[in-house]
Image (cartoon, rainbow, N blue to C red):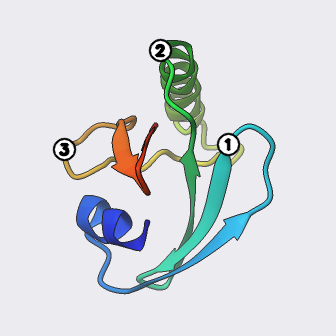
Amino acid sequence: MEKVLLEEFGFNKLELKKLDGYDNANYIVKADSKKYIFKTYLYSEETIDLIKAENEALLFLSTSHVVSFPYPIKFSDDSFVKCLNINGGQLI
């Protein structure tokens, strides 16, 4: 997991802690003096569509200057959603 985060987001050094979750695995990532949440999901076309819609909503909400919302971070290829082989399984 750490190797994927270093390669995909260009972090220099990071700390990774897995969070408890239901259907997906979330991680707190501390890197470059900032904190991020990295979400992973089991692969399915339905889940990809749901995550893309969630990102679009967050990007839209981030244009509001009244309230602060989480902002999606792009992968190295400028995508917000990506399928990766992590620990022997295909994850979103």
Q: Earlier in the sequence, mark 1 or mark 2?
A: 1
Q: Residue at x 57, y 49 (%)?
A: 39
Marker count (numbered): 3
Q: x, y percentage for residue 29?
A: 54, 71
Question: Residues under labels 2 and 3: Cα distance?
Answer: 20 Å
Q: Amino acid at mark 1?
A: Asn
Residue 26: which quarter of the image? bottom right
Horizontal arrangement in the rendering, residue 78 relative to residue 15 (left or right)? left
Residue situated furthest front in the rendering: 88
Identify the residue under disc 3. Answer: 77
* Image side of residue 7 versus residue 82, left or right: left
Q: Amino acid at mark 2?
A: Glu
In which quadrant of the rendered view does residue 62 lie?
Answer: top right
> What is the quadrant of the N terminus in the image?
bottom left
- Residue holding disc 2: 45
Disc 2 is placed on an element classified as helix
Q: Earlier in the sequence, mark 3 or mark 1?
A: 1
Residue with the mark numbered 1:
24
Relative to the observer, which residue lies in front, 81 or 4? 4
Q: What's the residue type where badge 3 is placed?
A: Asp
Task: Tell me the residue at 41%/51% (across/down).
Answer: 88
